[in-house]
Amino acid sequence: MSEPSNGAGRPLVSVVVPVFNEEKTVAQVVEELLALDLRLEILLVDDGSTDGSAAELARLAATYPQVTVHAQPRNLGKGAAVRRGIDESHGDILLIQDADLEYSPKDIPALIDPLLTGVADAVFGTRLRGGAHAQRAHLFWHYAGNRFLTLLSNVLYNTTISDMEVGYKAFRGDLVRGLTLVSNDFRIEPELTAKILRFGPEIRLYEVPISYYGRSYAEGKKITWKDGFGAVAALFRFRFTS
């Protein structure tokens, strides 16, 4: 596959966008990404959508040379879509962008700046550590669950992150492509966290405050409280095994 380019000489930023029934928002996500002053490849991974997403993704790929579409054979889960996007990527830097606009692409330059300047190997966004950023009020039990999972991560991995479940995570491309990832569902977030933190001080991990425009279930939010149990199991599993 040829490498997309919109400014040779600058670092290539791979943006992996898992898509499942997001025909109403994915075009806006792509347009906001392309508005950034970055050299991009945008990898749209269709996770077996049953709405009009496939046609919309095909239109975007035909319109923008930076966009490629990778179709899963059926709905395999967010983790499987993220893993597919990572495998297909070429970038010096890689980040994950949800297709539902809960996270604003306008935050990406600040998110990846520690990677571009060479002080970080991985950067996690945080919705819970200051900064003048818009924050939609969280569902209480989601907030409480995230705080618990974050505390558990800090205890198990001897660190001080503030938002383990955040969807905005960015990495050196070679680093994340070198991880052996296995999760198919929302456990991809704790797995990525665990496998980065297991490196210890060898990996320079930073956090950057980001905005959060969370959706309600009526608006299409997919993660539920049940996924919290899977996250706990994943944090313990990946602390001790690969």
Image: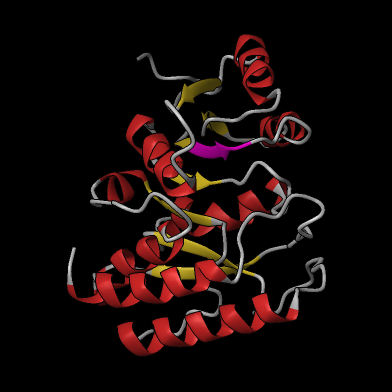
Q: Is residue 164 above or below residue 218?
A: below
Q: Examine the image and state in which quarter residue 57 appears.
A: top right
Q: Examine the image and state in which quarter residue 52 appears.
A: top right
In the orientation shown, which residue stands out farthest toward the left? 241
Q: Is residue 1 above or below residue 29?
A: above
In the image, residue 111 lies in the stretch drawn in magenta: no
Task: Please provide percent x and percent y for residue 113.
Answer: 54, 55
Q: If the image is split into quadrants, where does the C terminus sit? A: bottom left
Q: If the image is split into quadrants, where does the N terminus sit? A: top left
**What's the residue at 60%, 60% (across, down)?**
223
Magenta segment main secondary structure: strand
Task: Please provide percent x and percent y for residue 187.
Answer: 42, 61
In the orientation shown, which residue stands out farthest toward the top? 62
Q: Is residue 190 above or below residue 148?
A: above
Q: Examine the image and state in which quarter residue 137 appears.
A: bottom right
Task: Report the front residue among 184 and 238.
Answer: 184
**What's the residue at 19%, 75% (across, down)?**
240
Task: Please provide percent x and percent y for residue 157.
Answer: 31, 82
Q: Is residue 164 above or below residue 49?
A: below
Task: Report the front residue among 157 and 116.
Answer: 157
**What's the residue at 70%, 55% (across, down)?**
221
**What's the residue at 76%, 58% (across, down)?**
217
Task: Tell me where the magenta segment starts and ends, as one range.
Answer: 14-20
